[in-house]
Image: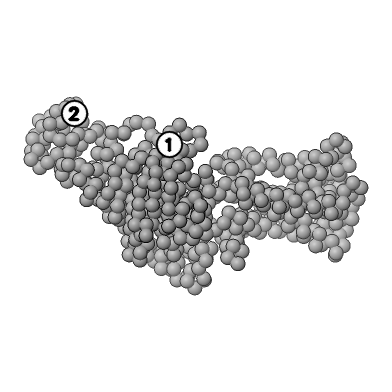
Amino acid sequence: MLPVRQAFLIAYMTGVLWLRRNPMSLVFTAISPFSLLFVLFIISNGQYVDFAVAGSLVMALVGYGLALGQDISFYKTEYKVQDVFVASPVSPLTYMMGLALSELLFGLPALIVLASLVVLSGASIFSIPLLAATILLIWGSMSAMGFFLSSHMLHMRNATQVISFVNVILAILPPVFYSIDRMPDILRPLAYAMPTTHASLILQYVMNDKTPEEWSLVFGFGVLIAYLIGFVALAKTKAIWRES
Amino acid sequence: MLAIEAAGVSKIYKGARQAALSDVSLQIEEGKILTLLGRNGAGKTTFVRICATQLMPSAGSINVLGYDVVRHAKQIRDLISVVPQEGRPLRALTSWDHIYNWLQIRGEGKQTAKAKTEDILRKLELYEARDRPAMNLSGGMKQKILVAMAMATDAQLLFLDEPTIGLDPVSRRQVWSAIKDWKAKGGSILLTTHYMDEAEMLSDYIVIIDRGAVISHGTIQELRRVIPQNIRIDIARDGLDIDALKPYGSVVDTGAGMLRVFTFESAVREVSELALRKNLAFTVSPVTLDDVFVYLVGGSIGENQNGRD
């Protein structure tokens, strides 16, 4: 039980206590995921609202994972907090989990609104567990990836640059905000290799939108689970906790 | 049992031309305080970080509280606590938040954590400011939060990497007092500091490191005997020929336009007269640990440093 308690205490320190004294942080974090939703809604006269909702939810989750990476880099290089945790009974995965929960807390208002929009866009009550599972899988894998990447960053500036790049690779280029039908056939395998593509497709499925014939829910979840296992394994075995 | 037993420890950072540590061997008995002294970049922090399982050694072996640092890091981490060099508390959190929650993260129950937090905050005179976020505290108070976090734990071995840097003289003494209390309860400490008075006040044993290698070690009394003379005379260098002082004892260039002569009482009068004839400022005092340090590492002043500390 101790690792779970440790993770919640880390989340409490870096999330709850921070928000209690800086409540405006919640507002700033809550607004940003709606920027592309707003733009797509306006330019398509509401036609692409389902893509925009799915895309915004996926992008928000990618953002929380990557923000975790930024936080970890900051705590490591600026505050030396990680040095204190390394030389303590806290494991790297517990530390990661605590900070990931903290990021989730910051993103909770936006997540609740976006998830509600998914439900209101035609989801049945039975598909809510699918929605929740998708959110958890993407959040978990992106957090593990953020932790892995940030552990290899020696300077804050590197972390910011790499994280912006990864955000484009995962949330902008793949068919997260648009239909995969718009992609040339030759690029589709590449798109299907991205976890964010499947997350977006699952959300479209949940909203009763048409999904490609070659894609299935099982395939989508299989990829998301594989990514979660892969990134957590990467974070556990290849993230730099004790420096060499 | 030994708190730390290091044998032939070396560290070469990736891409570095020189070793940050070369063949360092030392021991700390349980319940004792060992202080590492050395200039910036000498390798003190590298050694501390290796012992605290934050950094892998390149060669050699280190046992901490009976466990090998490479193979049994997990066991060691249950038994140690650290104050990192240049660490900072989280801006929005108070001293109470830091210590109380940190103790719970380390496995303490709420009641014990509360009692220990209150105790250490009072000891370090942070209690009155316990509800103020760290961003509203002075630099010294922030540093004391990190010290308090480490010292409130049940660890058997503390790693304090320049714990009193930036503290005013009163705060430094509060930290010294807490360190002494810790030791009185049987805890062991590996300390690094640039303050010689701190080292003299707290250390059972001192190891002096220069350019990654141990150049001297011993108790304060033993180290004082490194300098055969018992008096030091500092003289402004201004035009003074260093050879003119050599007949009176050992002469060291302290690098600040001053020469330091280590000598005996019998030569004080002659050296003083020499300085007065040339109208040079001078002071006479007994040899201290500071002198031993300058005597041992003074030759390297002005030379390139070793890279990382």
- Looking at the rendered structure, the kind of residue marked 1 is Ala
Residue drawn at x 50%, y 33% as measured from the top left: B15
User: Residue, x 14% and y 39% (percent of image)?
Assistant: B263
Say which element carries label 2: helix
Residue drawn where x is 12% and y is 41% of the image:
B264
The residue located at (50%, 55%) in the rendering is B72
Q: Which mark is residue B19?
A: 1
Q: Are marks 2 and 1 on the same chain?
A: yes
Q: How is the image coloured?
A: one colour
Task: Provide residue B50's location: percent of width, then percent of height.
Answer: 45, 48
Disc marking residue B202: none
Chain identity of mark 1:
B
Left or right: where A219 falls relative to B205: right
Residue B75 drawn at (x, y percent): 49, 59
Please provide percent x and percent y for residue A193.
Answer: 78, 43
Tag nearer the camera, 2 or 1: 1
Tell me where residue B24 sits by quadrant. Answer: top left
First reached walking from the N terminus: tag 2 or tag 1: 1
Residue A103, given in percent of the width and then of the height, sits at: 64, 55
Depth check: B243 or B240 in front? B243
* Residue receiving disc 2: B242
Residue A150 against residue B171 in the figure, above or below: above
- Give the camera-side residue of A152 and B25: B25
Residue type at mark 2: give it.
Answer: Ile
Left or right relative to A48: residue A144: left
Instruction: In this rendered view, identify the residue nearer to me: B2 or A179.
Output: B2
Does residue B117 appear in the picture of this structure? yes
